[in-house]
Image (spheres, helix red, strand yellow):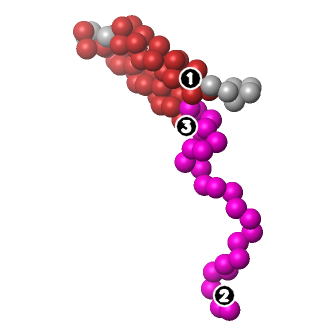
Amino acid sequence: MVLNRLVWLGAGGLGVLTFVAMLTANAFWTMNGHERFIATNSFFEHLGLIAGLVVVAIMSEPTSCRPAVVGPSTIVQGASR
C-alpha cells in the first residue's frame, strides 16, 4: 500500500483467504443455540472485512469510478450569457 503497487492483488489474496477461512471455521449452519449466534456474527464480520478489501482494491486504481479532475468550471448555474 505504501507504493500503491499491486494493491488489488494483495487485497484480492486476503479476500480469498478470508473467504475460505470463513467457510471452514464458521460453519454456523451446523450449530445450535448461542454457539450458532456467535459463529453467525463472526461469519458476517468477516464478510464485511471482505467487502472492505474490495473497496480498497477499487479505490487503489487511479482509473476507478472516481470522477476526473478538471479545471475550473466555465458554466455557472443560473447565469445567462
Question: Image quadrant for the N terminus?
Answer: top right
Instruction: Write down the region rendered in magenta.
Output: 56-81
The furthest residue to the bottom: 81
Q: Position of residue 64 (x, y in %)?
A: 57, 44
Is 49 situated left or right of 1 in this image?
left
Crowding at label 1, few (<14), some or many (≥20) Cα neighbours within 10 Å? few
**Gap in angstroms between the C-alphas marked 2 and 3:** 37 Å
Res 60 → quadrant: top right
Asked whether the residues under the numbered discs 1 and 2 touch, taking CB atoms below 8 Å apart as contact, a structural biologist would say: no
Q: Where is residue 49 in the image (x, y as percent from the top left)?
A: 50, 25
* Circle 1: element type: helix
At label 2, which amino acid type do we have? Ala
The residue under label 3 is 58
Is 62 situated left or right of 17 in this image?
right
Question: Image quadrant for the C terminus?
Answer: bottom right
Res 77 → quadrant: bottom right
Crowding at label 2, few (<14), some or many (≥20) Cα neighbours within 10 Å? few
Res 24 → quadrant: top left
Q: Which of marks 2 and 3 is nearer the N terminus?
A: 3
At label 3, which amino acid type do we have? Ile
Crowding at label 3, few (<14), some or many (≥20) Cα neighbours within 10 Å? some
* Circle 3: element type: helix
